[in-house]
Amino acid sequence: MSPQVEAAFARLPEYLAWHVLLSASALGLGLLISLPLAVAASRNRHIRWPVLAGASLIQTIPSLALLALFFPLLLVISAASEDLIGHGFSALGFLPALLALTLYSMLPIVRNGTTGILSVSPAIIQAAEGVGMTPRQRLFQVELPLAAPVIMAGVRTAAVWTIGAATLSTPVGQTSLGNYIFSGLQTENWVLVLFGCGASALLAMATDQLLGLIEAGAAKRDLKRAAIGAAGILIGVVVALTPLISFGKPASYVVGAKNFSEQYILAEMIAERIEDLGGEARSKEDLGSAIAYRALASGEIDVYVDYSGTLWANVLNREDNPGRQAVLEELTKELAERDGVLVLGSLGFENAYALAMRQDRAAELGIETLDDLARRSASLTMGGDLEFFARPEWQAINEAYGFDFQARRSFQPTFMFRAVTSGDVDVISAFSSDGRIAADDLVTLDDPRQALPPYDAVVLIAPDRVNDARLLAALRPLIGAIPVEAMRDANYSVDRDVDKLRPVEAGRALSRTLGLD
Amino acid sequence: MVEPRIALERVTKTYGAHVALAEASLTVQAGEFVALVGASGSGKTTLLKTINGLIAPESGEVRIEGEAVGALEPHILRRRIGYVFQEVGLFPHLTVAENISITPKLLGWDKARRAARAAELLDLVALPREMAGRFPAALSGGQQQRVGVARALAAEPHIVLMDEPFGALDPLTRDALGDDYRALHERLNLATVMVTHDMTEALLLADRIVVVADGRLIADGAPQVLAASSDPEVAALLAAPRRQAERLRARLGESA
Ligand SMILES: Nc1ncnc2c1ncn2[C@@H]1O[C@H](COP(=O)(O)OP(=O)(O)OP(=O)(O)O)[C@@H](O)[C@H]1O
Ligand SMILES: [Mg+2]
């Protein structure tokens, strides 16, 4: 077995356990809500339409968006409960994922439940009344048993959907089989992506087959078959959950990471340093960019690395650019005052937005700066990562240089680099510390008008950890210690197609190179 | 005075503009066996269902053993009344035995008593006891109908309403079952109302025949009283079996 696959298998028990716990809880909760709703909808014509329409509406929200929407909502509720009863709760991870998936599981159960109950023939209903059943007895002894096969078919659909959508809970900080997929996509580790997809598909198929046994048992009134299916589900859940008994205990430090290689590498480095000083560390990877800071400010995570320009624009909502040092100083002051967050310092390199082109293409067109680019832009195509065109940086350079591109396209970062090297697009948004710039023979264009804000990588510490001596001792040596070339190499060692390192290995190598270990 | 088992007073039921039952009045005493006859769509099923509260009339009153139906908990009332549905309506997810003992179960009878009762009723409707474990889908139409009769009788009701209970049976079984039921009716002093399209059956089994036409009860009396009726519709109904018997005798006589 290749070391990659071996490493993937090593993480399977934990990922699978969380995935099963999450999907099973969501499905269970979904059933608990959906069945009464289905009964109510079948009983009352007036609520039938709103209930079914509501469930369909939820289904039209992309599942990733639905998951992300619960984070701010829970944050608000948590803050309110903190004010009210002095106890907040975690707005990150399990809870938002559970709620979103629960909602997501409801449509097939509500719809099949309603249809199933309504399709019991009027003659049977009347017979149930005629023999002296109360409405409740009629429901439990006649309507639900007769609708059971249809309801079970809905549960199967819901189960398959939920298990698939649960992979998307990774970006809101919930470990799942999606961790393979998201990490793999970012580091271009396709084995990992396939592994994650395969594991989740197998899980969905196995669940579907077992639920199918229950469905067939219900349809053929074959109790034995239904019992085998139910037992299979139960045993599967229990076995899958056993690893959580050891994994479940809360780690003392939670290191956050957004969803790209540099973040994984730095998070691994930070976690190892904490462990070297006798602390326990756990990482929460693949946090959405907007979610990470809020997670830190609310104490969901204890430490992570962000970039000064990102914080400047997204957290402080500033559009001006007073210069690198001033931005750092003001951020440090403002974040401390506003949220109690400590900006420990810059790591020593910038991961700034830059526009990049193929070296040969830039030379051919005579483009060195953004001014040169603007003159040629009418005949050029621009590619951006998924958030770039919505960011203030894009607005800023657009205003400063007056671009007029022929077309604009958004990509997953990995595919964006493919697109520029293959010539599908002429210029892309890139990050200055990205190892692929050098590796793909790209050049970054100068920004003579200083429209792009600085993006120093800074270490941020959660409010209730600002005086944590161990954490500060572990992190202080990193400040100012990582030059951009070293970071680029480390990033490339994870992103390249051959001889890939895992982030944890790249982190160790970086520590070694810099004499930090 | 003893309250009649069933009493309908000027009961009216309409479906939109259509009058399914028009001021129908009827009393049935303990021990009486009433046959309801009349054309298809005349309102027989409607009348039967108002008695156990499956249909609520617009006006008029229905009383069961002196109590107004509207004032009783419907499920309590229905557990006291056996009902055989025209469309049988066996529960497809329950076995024959479970179907038969459904009302006893709702009444809280213990398992042994229910099983014994189910066996007894299978004997009564001339079905083998081995059928107890089968599901309704594995029965013939006539067998299903007999299970429907058994189900109606299971909780030992004093009142039995039957909507064409023997329609799908062969003549021999039908005859035997009719006689057996009549004997049971007498032994337990039941009040029975049976809808039938078979005039001969009505004449042979019932104490009284009630003729329904367009939602009205146009005749109500013992077979011999009805036979003397001057109403042309009633006379035509009663003439039919007699005429049939004569033609039968003629044909069989010819061939003999
Ligand atoms: N739910 C309903 N909605 C509208 N009309 C109805 C409904 N139920 C019955 N009817 C009408 O009421 C009339 C009486 O129906 P009912 O079922 O009592 O007839 P019936 O005498 O039992 O006929 P059959 O011998 O064919 O069973 C019929 O004309 C029928 O079409
Ligand atoms: Mg009828």
Image (cartoon, coloured by chain):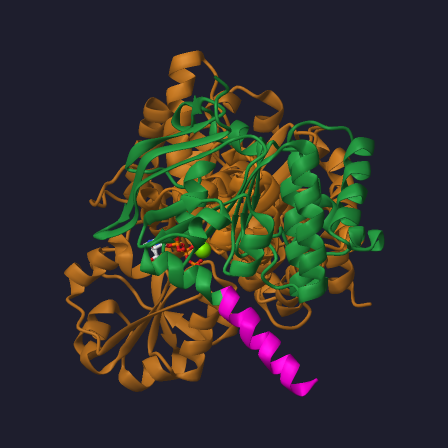
Left/right placement of residue A171 relative to residue B120 reads left
Left/right placement of residue B221 relative to residue A235 reads left
In the depicted structure, whether residue A280 falls above or below residue B237: above
Q: Nearer the viewer, residue A454 or B255?
A: B255
Q: Give the range drawn in magenta.
A: B241-256
Left/right placement of residue A320 relative to residue B26 reads left
Looking at the rendered structure, the number of numbered marks drawn on it comes to 0
Give me the residue at 50% from left, 35% from top: A135
Task: Locate the N terminus of chain A and report the quarter of the image it occupies.
Answer: bottom right
Which chain is represented by orange in the image?
A
Residue B23 rendering spot, x and y as whole percentages: 28, 40
Give me the residue at 33% from left, 43% from top: A47
Which chain is represented by green in the image?
B
Left/right placement of residue A207 relative to residue A455 reads right
Residue A332 counted in the magenta span: no
Q: Nearer the viewer, residue B151 or B126?
A: B126
Q: Please tell me whether the stretch drawn in magenta is mainly helix, strand or loop.
A: helix
Give me the residue at 44% from left, 40% from top: B54
Residue A351 rendering spot, x and y as whole percentages: 42, 53
In the depicted structure, whether residue B172 falls above or below residue A329: below
Ligand 2 appears in which quadrant?
bottom left
